[in-house]
Amino acid sequence: MSTPVDKAQSLARLHAAPEILRLVNVWDAVSAKTIAALPETRAIATAGHSIAASYGYADGEIPLDEMLDMVGRIVAAVGDLPVTADLDAGHGDAGETVRRAIGKGVVGANVEDRLQPLADSAAAVEAIVAAGEAEGVPFVLNARTDAFVRAGGRPLDESIADAIERGRAYLGAGADLVFVPGILDADVTRRLVEGIGERKVSVIGLPGSLTASEYEDLGVARISYGPMPQRVALTALQDVAADLYDGGVIPASTRSLN
């Protein structure tokens, strides 16, 4: 049985490997077990938006206790696979939130800056790193900057410069990676990797994004998919329900996965 230290070290190695780490986000125990059963799965990432939606909350509004309860269930469901959790903006105290997440078996996390003042955001990174050290776990922080998703109408070059400045500051404060969500084309991605570092940038796969292989060629370390896997699953659910209402039957290709 792997220890939390073993899992954290495994997650760090996956980020440092030449191959991009592909993470299909999950939101409950059964979705986690379904993804964990695939031989290609090397680690598990939770989607905060999706967990919140499963409880009936808007993104970012789920109480921490409920979020951590589900994260703990996901950890228990996937055995020795390392779990990295979406912890929103840290729920008011990023260090304490990470300490509690480690207690649930989590060994890595995304924590977003929401474009708060850089000094405050860097201090939050330092608090997270310190929490991992205090718990004896080499916690893997994928520090998220909202330089693109909260950019408003500012010019693209300003968002790129902001992401690079913040990314460098977060790495300097002890983060392992810098997560820059948004639909990033090849030129923007290349500039981010050049500014932040090879194998130090993490991206999200959205409709209109590059493929994982294309991001890998540009030096990106990790790609995850946020709420999109849940949306795909819910689209399939709604489509099959509409077909059943219209006289259809359950497809013969349906598999038993739980």
Image (cartoon, rainbow, N blue to C red):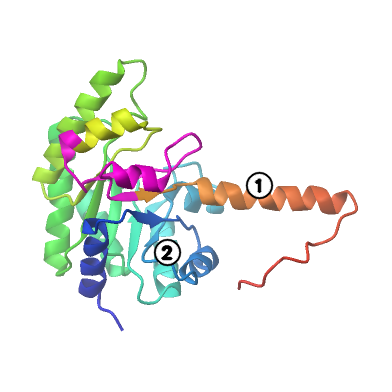
Residue at image location 18% in from the left, 35% down from the top: 194
In this picture, residue 38 sits left or right of residue 102 = right
* Magenta stretch holds residue 85: no
Check disc 2 and report the residue beneath it.
Answer: 69
134 or 251: which is nearer to us? Answer: 251
Give coordinates of residue 71: x percent, y percent.
40, 63
Residue 235 numbered mark, or none: 1
Question: In the rendered image, which quarter contains the C terminus?
Answer: bottom right
As for residue 201 lying within the magenta part, the answer is yes
Q: Secondary structure at mark 1?
A: helix
User: In this picture, which residue range is highlighted in magenta?
Assistant: 194-222
Please report the residue visible at 51 percent of the width from the left and 46 percent of the height from the top: 228
| Callout in the foreground (2, 1) | 1
Farthest residue, direction bottom: 1
Left of 240 or right of it: where is 138?
A: left
Please state which amino acid type lies under the numbered disc 2.
Asp
Residue 203 x %, y %: 34, 43
Image quarter of the N terminus: bottom left
